[in-house]
Image (spheres, rainbow, N blue to C red):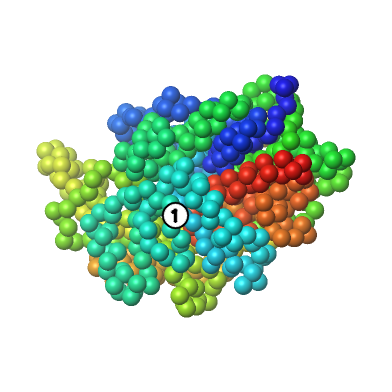
């Protein structure tokens, strides 16, 4: 086999790209995984994973220089000195904001699988049917029964801890034993359940942190340093899970520093024949050829590649025949909720630093509830005690200060909403041909915002949070409605949606591009709606499902 010819090409190495590589190689396909950024090796390159906060020059914080260099990242918590190298250099990779868009990117092997929040929730038919029932956008081409076995399949491999609850709006996963709520969370959960007659439930978060050993991975150590990389493999990432499995087959080649600039389309076969790559280090152009291509560059970058793959047949890009490519940008809107203090538990504490919180599943526009907006929201949060870093104005020096910090501080409890953003056609991305990146490539211009439906929902997200905490006995409860700009949830979705009709969608029900059916797109770009839960588990399941279909179609010589 020539150096540039493979059975399959996978573009991107994050959560969905890692799964694509694993599934395709395990099914016997010689596969190359192309990643635009640097390589990061499991354990070896987690250089800050075992450091204490005192070992960082600024205790893990941010400097004025960092604030100047990262105008987007500084808008929220990701800007810090502990894993700065894992976030994109914004000067090298700019983008245009027609309307504000907070785009937090990780260009390296593993992508944001090293940086994600790890919350994993299944969708239900409440979510898959919503568009059709409400006449919003287009109908999903699948239902829960289509993806249910694939949820189970990826959960067994990735390792998801959580509790079985038998909730119709939130199907149970194949779980490892759940992490434990602390004493305050248990009492708050019981009071919420009683106060709302079981119509609202507070459960432990469902997370890709393992509580039992699996494969060569050790169970979570409760260090809560996940986004520095876990030397124990305690959470699911490409490096800890899918990449070792793929490498074990002997069928995978990983090529970092490889910016895929376009998909090469063959007019005669009406298929893609490969990709063009710009080497990020030497600026040389290369071509790689394969029978199938999995596009997993993350939502906006996958669509950028499709747009950049324009031909005389499709001047707006491969997959643009429906007029929907680049449209229907979604995320989750957040930064609305409440917090307060909790009294009476001064003699209680908790074990370690649990890298997980609580979850309150959606209850609005459900169970007969009807609001003046569509869809709903869930809450994430938790209870904790102030630690050594709390500010004590009266005791700011000397022995008294040290003595005070030897004791844990006050208990507090907070919950923040994750609300669904509807798929609006006018929320879009386009190619900005006037703004080039470091490599002279077109960049992305964003024109997206949330609208009246989201604004109405946020009122409930704040008020309900206040009401629930007060009903549970939390004191000094204060609500908030902060900055929920699109992108802030880091759950970008849409731009290459799947559907039943090539006239209204970019992909079919198997994640194939209608216009070139040997190209599969299985990252967040395929989403036809957003739900209000973290989406990564659905990307995993849909990627495994698409890979299975791709192999089947290859054997039948349909692609």
Q: Residue at x 77, y 44 (%)?
A: 558
Number of numbered labels in the structure image: 1
Q: Is residue 62 visible?
A: no
Q: Residue at x 64, y 23 (%)?
A: 281
Name the residue at the front extreme. 556
Residue 238 position in % (x across, y down): 51, 36
Residue 208 position in % (x across, y down): 42, 45
Element type where label 1 sits in the image = loop
Q: Nearer the viewer, residue 248 or 336?
A: 248
Residue 173, image quadrant? bottom left
Q: Is residue 406 above or below residue 192?
A: above
Q: Residue at x 59, y 67 (%)?
A: 129
Residue 290 position in % (x across, y down): 73, 33
**In this rendering, position of residue 460 left or right of residue 31:** left
Q: Is residue 360 above or below residue 272?
A: below
Image quarter where the C terminus lies is: top right
**In this rendering, position of residue 475 left or right of residue 536:** left
Characterize the local packing of mark 1: few (<14), some (14-19) or many (20 or more) Cα atoms within 10 angstroms.
Answer: many
Q: Is residue 369 visible?
A: yes
Q: What residue does disc 1 label? A: 173
Q: Residue at x 39, y 44 (%)?
A: 209
Residue 277, image quadrant? top right
**In this rendering, position of residue 336 left or right of residue 185:** right
**In this rendering, position of residue 543 left or right of residue 351:** right
């Amino acid at each position: 086999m020539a150096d540039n010819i493979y059975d399959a090409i996978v573009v991107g190495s994050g959560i969905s790209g890692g799964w694509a590589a694993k599934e395709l190689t395990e099914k016997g396909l010689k596969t190359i995984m192309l990643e635009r950024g640097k390589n990061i090796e499991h354990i070896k390159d987690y250089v800050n994973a075992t450091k204490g906060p005192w070992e960082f020059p600024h205790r893990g914080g941010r400097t004025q220089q960092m604030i100047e260099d990262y105008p987007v990242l500084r808008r929220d918590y990701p800007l810090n000195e502990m894993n700065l190298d894992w976030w994109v250099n914004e000067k090298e990779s700019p983008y245009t904001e027609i309307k504000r868009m907070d785009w937090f990117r990780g260009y390296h092997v593993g992508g944001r699988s090293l940086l994600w929040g790890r919350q994993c929730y299944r969708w239900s038919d409440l979510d898959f049917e919503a568009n059709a029932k409400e006449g919003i956008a287009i109908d999903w081409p699948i239902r829960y029964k289509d993806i249910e076995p694939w949820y189970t399949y990826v959960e067994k491999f990735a390792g998801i801890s959580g509790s079985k609850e038998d909730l119709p709006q939130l199907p149970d996963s194949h779980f490892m034993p759940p992490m434990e709520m602390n004493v305050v969370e248990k009492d708050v959960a019981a009071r919420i359940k009683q106060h709302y007659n079981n119509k609202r439930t507070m459960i432990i978060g469902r997370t890709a942190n393992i509580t039992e050993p699996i494969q060569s991975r050790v169970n979570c150590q409760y260090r809560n340093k996940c986004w520095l990389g876990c030397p124990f493999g305690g959470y699911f990432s490409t490096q800890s899970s899918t990449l070792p499995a793929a490498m074990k087959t002997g069928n995978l080649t990983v090529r970092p520093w490889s910016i895929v600039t376009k998909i090469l389309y063959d007019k005669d076969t009406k298929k893609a024949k490969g990709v063009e790559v710009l080497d990020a280090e030497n600026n040389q152009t290369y071509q790689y050829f394969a029978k199938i291509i999995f596009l997993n560059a993350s939502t906006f970058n996958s669509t950028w590649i499709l747009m950049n793959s324009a031909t005389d047949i499709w001047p707006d890009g491969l997959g643009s025949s429906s007029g929907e490519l680049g449209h229907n940008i979604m995320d989750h809107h957040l930064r609305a909720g409440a917090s307060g203090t909790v009294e009476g538990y001064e003699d209680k504490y908790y074990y370690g630093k649990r890298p997980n919180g609580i979850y309150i599943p959606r209850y609005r526009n459900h169970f007969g509830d009807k609001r003046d907006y569509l869809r709903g929201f869930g809450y994430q949060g938790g209870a904790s005690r102030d630690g050594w870093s709390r500010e004590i104005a009266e005791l700011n020096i000397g022995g008294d200060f040290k003595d005070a910090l030897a004791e844990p501080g006050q208990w507090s409890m907070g919950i923040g909403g994750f609300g669904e953003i509807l798929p609006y056609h006018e929320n879009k991305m386009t190619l900005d041909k006037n703004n080039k990146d470091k490599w002279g490539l077109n960049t992305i211009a964003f024109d997206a915002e949330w609208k009246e439906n989201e604004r109405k929902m946020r009122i409930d997200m704040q008020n309900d949070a206040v009401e629930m905490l007060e009903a549970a006995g939390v004191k000094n409860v204060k609500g908030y409605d902060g900055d929920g700009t699109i992108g802030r949830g880091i759950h970008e979705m849409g731009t290459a949606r799947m559907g039943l009709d090539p006239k209204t969608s970019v992909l079919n029900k198997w994640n194939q591009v209608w216009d070139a059916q040997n190209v599969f797109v299985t990252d967040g770009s395929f989403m036809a709606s957003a739900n209000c839960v973290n989406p990564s588990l659905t990307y995993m399941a849909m990627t495994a499902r698409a890979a299975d279909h791709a192999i089947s179609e290859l054997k039948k010589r349909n692609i």
